[in-house]
Amino acid sequence: MIKFGVLISGGGSNLQAIIDAVAAGKLDGEIALVVSSKADAYGLTRAEQAGIPTLALCKADYADPLAADVRIASALQAARADYVVMAGYMRMVREPLLKAFPNRIINLHPALLPSFAGAHGIADAFDYGVKLTGVTVHFANEEYDKGAIIAQEAVAIAEGDTLESLEEKIHAVEHKLYPRVLQMIAQGRVAIGENGKVRIL
């Protein structure tokens, strides 16, 4: 059975969606370890309630970001993780992690990349006034939000939407799309072609 390591920084709602998918038999995998960049992240509580081992880092640990990623990579390898899943992880993954898990680190972005990359994808799309935004699942690489795209799902911005209502719509899609993509990975259906683009088998 495939094992995932999950990286978080906050509340862990996408982590919970993955936990629930595993429990419901919709994701043929196991969460081997949850790593948080914040010691007080509620996602750690979600993991502990589900009996999942955790590793909590703090701001001081990231004073040397390369050393932090060496520590994270070592912990994930010790937990025998096959893939790394970024679920609201607000730190850039760097060379130690990327080398330890080549083409095996997945990220979730709350916009339709390459549009509205960065930490404020929902607000940026809303403020710009686009009528369509969405969710992207992609491989992580050495640049923010630039890795090969695995899946996308559109979300319409209605006339009456507020930033808060759009956030709710985006998160609802995230919680369904992410476990579905991870199941495709568990089934061996996701591959990167010679052109660097993702093929779904």
Image: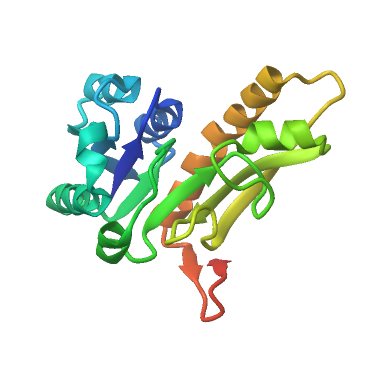
Can the viewer see residue 152 in this picture?
Answer: yes
Residue visible at 33% across and 19% down in the picture: 42
Q: Nearer the viewer, residue 44 or 141?
A: 141
Residue visible at 25% across and 19% down in the picture: 49
Residue visible at 19% across and 54% down in the picture: 70
Side of 34 relative to 171 (left or right)? left
Residue 111, given in percent of the width and then of the height, sits at: 65, 42
Side of 100 relative to 88 (left or right)? left
In this view, 187 is above or below 195: above
Side of 126 relative to 15 (left or right)? right
Residue 178, given in percent of the width and then of the height, sits at: 50, 41
Quarter of the figure with residue 38 = top left
Residue visible at 15% across and 47% down in the picture: 75
In this view, 53 is above or below 193: above
Q: Nearer the viewer, residue 96 or 21?
A: 96
Residue 67, given in percent of the width and then of the height, sits at: 19, 52
Q: Nearer the viewer, residue 2 or 101?
A: 101
In this view, 19 is above or below 27: above
